[in-house]
Image (spheres, grey):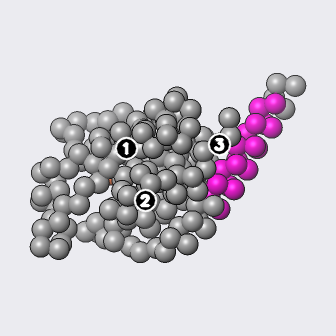
Amino acid sequence: MSRVTMQDILNHEITQKFIKRSGLAHAVATAEYALKLSKVHGVNPDLAVKAAFLHDIGHYTWYRNGKWDYSLYKENDIHAIKGAERAHKLLIRLGEHPVNAKKIALAVLLHTDSYLPEGELHLDPLQNVVALADKCDEEPGGSHHYKQISDYDAFQRLKKLDEQIEKALEADESAQSASVS
Ligand SMILES: [Fe+2]
Ligand SMILES: [Fe+2]
């Protein structure tokens, strides 16, 4: 089965409809951080980049009088829950393996604890990489959601990520077959 690429994900109508609500630039930057962090934490780069790119796809637009209303958001937000479901649906439609689609959806679900009752989440390495990548791109007052990027630049940066992921996966495979032989 051929790999579902970041370009496939970007071009899908579900992505096009929802990803810009929380910022395409934030999604791309988080995906780039996730690739770097996946190397440090020994996590599958393909899953980390996909989950990072899709982590905020569940956002609803909490606007009042044309401005983001943080208190309205804080009170009603379930973007991680909605995003997990949306990301899962999108990935299954694109032909992602169901095991991978579930792992990515769980990392989206757990990328923030802002919607959960007080307590501590115990994240696995993939979930941790996605949560850290999100934090790396965070800016005060949520301004990371308003950063701009052209569709062309987003496409180019995701294309580059695809190339880097495929290289990393190939290197992993050859390291594994070398250790077996
Ligand atoms: Fe988020
Ligand atoms: Fe985010």
Q: Pick the residue in front: 39 or 30.
A: 30
Task: Identify the image quadrant of the N terminus.
Answer: top right
What is the x, y in percent for residue 73? 17, 56
Rate crowding at label 1 as few (under 14), some (14 to 19) or many (20 or more) other CA atoms within 10 Å. many
What is the x, y in percent for residue 155? 57, 65
Identity of the amino acid at label 1?
Arg
Q: Is residue 131 visible?
A: no
Q: Pick the residue in front: 121 or 81.
A: 81
Give me the disc on residue 3. Answer: 3
Write the residue at 49% across / 37% down. 92
Q: Considering only vertical position in the picture, is 101 above or below 58?
A: above
Label 3 – label 1 distance at C-alpha: 19 Å
Q: Nearer the viewer, mark 3 or mark 2?
A: 2
Label 3 – label 2 distance at C-alpha: 20 Å
Write the residue at 61% across / 50% down. 5
Rate crowding at label 2 as few (under 14), some (14 to 19) or many (20 or more) other CA atoms within 10 Å. some
Residue 33 shown in magenta: no
Q: Which residues are magenta?
A: 160-177
Give me the disc on residue 86. Answer: 1
Question: Tag 2 or tag 3, which sits nearer the N-term?
Answer: 3
Identity of the amino acid at label 3?
Arg
Rate crowding at label 3 as few (under 14), some (14 to 19) or many (20 or more) other CA atoms within 10 Å. few
- Disc 2 is placed on an element classified as helix
Residue 171 shown in magenta: yes
Give me the disc on residue 7. Answer: none
Q: How many marks?
A: 3
Write the residue at 41% across / 51% down. 14
